[in-house]
Amino acid sequence: MDLGIKGRQAIVCASSKGLGLGCAEELAANGVNLVMNARTADVLNASADRLRDTYGVKVKAVATDITTPD
């Protein structure tokens, strides 16, 4: 089903694994470019690389803890 969101941008937090990754993957499968966030850089980068390679979308990975001001 075409959701009409191809080419749009989305920010998905806590997206290196679990439900966040599931959301990011579904968006990528529908052609949405992503900014993915998680605290653990290596796991996040691996997930981002897989989505880029699998779906051909642009993915920026930002490893940070969004619960702290730093």
Image (cartoon, helix red, strand yellow):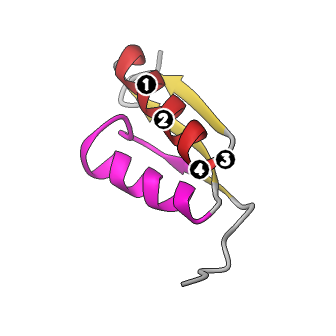
The quarter of the picture where the N terminus appears is bottom right
> Magenta segment, which residues?
11-30
- Disc 1 marks which amino acid? Ala
x then y, percent, for residue 23: 40, 57
At x 43%, y 24%, the residue is 46
- Residue at mark 1: 46
Q: In which quarter of the image is residue 3?
A: bottom right
x then y, percent, for residue 28: 55, 55
- Residue at mark 2: 50
C-beta proximity under 8 Å, tags 1 and 2: yes
x then y, percent, for residue 50: 48, 35
At x 46%, y 51%, the residue is 24
View extreme (bottom): residue: 1
Nearer the observer, 67 or 57: 57
Between the residue at mark 4 and the residue at mark 3, the CA separation in whole angstroms equals: 6 Å
Provide the secondary structure element on which disc 4 rests. Answer: helix
- Disc 3 marks which amino acid? Val
